[in-house]
Image: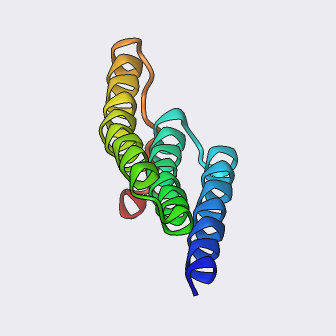
Amino acid sequence: MQEIIGAILLITGSLFGVIGVLGLLRFPDFFTRMHGASITDTLCAILIIAGLMVLSGKFLVIAKLLMVLFFLLFTTPTAAYGLARTALKAGFKPAVADNPRER
């Protein structure tokens, strides 16, 4: 049962990683691409690390994986925020729809 739950978490995390790549390819501008990538990257990391925790079963490995997860949960959104702020200051403008109903 432990292997099944771990495999499900790993596969689900990998699928979110693929969805993030599709977002990078399909979204229209820098800001939406960055948002899609950072959201799916965080969820992907949570699911993959949770799957590795389930599969390892050893306390020391779980503790190390929790530290990595804690680090990722703080650095990924912070890096995305810093990147977006720097892009705005550099003159990048978000894409805006022409139709007010599409905003």
Residue extending farthest top: 90
User: Observer-nearest residue: 22 or 14?
Assistant: 14
The residue shown at (46%, 59%) is 58
Q: In screen coordinates, is 8 left or right of 98?
A: right
Give percent across and percent down for residue 85: 32, 23
User: Residue 47: x, y in percent?
Assistant: 49, 63
Quarter of the figure with the N terminus: bottom right
Q: How is the image coloured?
A: rainbow
The x and y percentages for residue 94 are 43, 35
Is 38 displayed left or right of 13 in the figure? left
Q: Could you say where residue 50 lies in the image, as x and y percent from the top left?
A: 46, 63
- Note whether 6 is above or below 98 in the view shown: below
| Residue occupying image coordinates x 42% and y 27% | 93
Query: Residue 6's image quarter?
Result: bottom right
Q: Residue at x 65, y 60 (%)?
A: 14
Q: How many marks on residues?
A: 0
Q: Is residue 98 visible?
A: no
- Asked if one can make out residue 60 in the rendered structure from this viewpoint, the answer is yes
Q: Is residue 96 left or right of residue 3?
A: left
Residue 88 found in image quarter: top left
Asked if residue 22 is positioned above or below residue 82 in the image, the reply reads: below
Instruction: Name the quadrant of the C terminus.
Output: bottom left
Q: In the figure, 2 relative to 77: above or below? A: below
Give left or right: position of 80 versus 18.
left
The residue under the point 41% across, 15% down is 91
